[in-house]
Image (tube, rainbow, N blue to C red):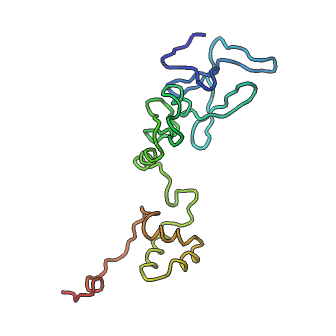
Amino acid sequence: MMYDSTNRKPYPKFPAYLVGKDGTIWRTEFRNRNGTKKLDIPRQSKPRIRSTYPAVGLWKNGKQTSESVHIMVLETFVGPRPAPNFQAAHLDGNPLNPRLENLQWTTKKVNNNHKRAHGTMPFGIKSGTAKLTDEDVIDIRAARKDGVMTHVLAERYGVANTTIRRAVNGQRWGHVKAHTPATPSAEHNGKDAL
């Protein structure tokens, strides 16, 4: 079978599939109830979106598995994941762009920095697990400043004490900036105003 080996290479885990530098996936075999047949011309596989990333179904030894296209591109052209804590980073922030020049293996920390830089990091109310809103955090910070105890706020908002402490000290919800009026210097530091 002839193919351009500079732009398409066999996927190491599933050699019956070719991976393109442009993120395309090609089948070189066809399976049916009569067995497996080599294709004269590779057929392009159509990816489906799985958890925001394009993925394709791959067959080997009668079993199907789903693989993310961006992972396949990196494993084929760069090599296996360097360490378990490494992730495939999309340098432009677009999870639908699995081109080789847009991908690299990075640590989770570096990948999260990329996500923050291009605005794709879900945080605050954009996070699927958020239990507070930006307004709640502003109100909680004001209440703590007024002396309301952490456990009282935790019970009021239905969250753990730790969640309240982290929201107050900015360890979580650090992006929320309260719009509180300026305090006169006399009240703030106990000195007479001039």
The residue depicted at 67 percent of the width and 31 percent of the height is 57
Q: Position of residue 129 (x, y in %)?
A: 58, 59
The residue depicted at 55 percent of the width and 80 percent of the height is 152
The residue depicted at 68 percent of the width and 33 percent of the height is 65
* Residue 58 left/right relative to 34: left
The residue depicted at 46 percent of the width and 43 percent of the height is 107
Q: Is residue 153 above or below residue 166?
A: below
Quadrant occupied by the C terminus: bottom left
* Residue 134 left/right relative to 156: left
Image mark count: 0
Residue situated furthest bottom in the rendering: 192
Residue situated furthest left in the rendering: 194
Q: Position of residue 11 (x, y in %)?
A: 58, 24
Residue situated furthest right in the rendering: 33
Q: Is residue 172 above or below residue 120?
A: below
- Quadrant of residue 161 in the image? bottom right
Q: Position of residue 100 (x, y in %)?
A: 47, 29
Q: Position of residue 26 (x, y in %)?
A: 61, 22
Is residue 134 or residue 165 the one in the foreground?
A: 165
Quadrant occupied by the N terminus: top right
- Quadrant of residue 14 in the image? top right
Q: Is residue 103 above or below residue 185?
A: above
Is residue 52 or residue 88 the one in the foreground?
A: 88
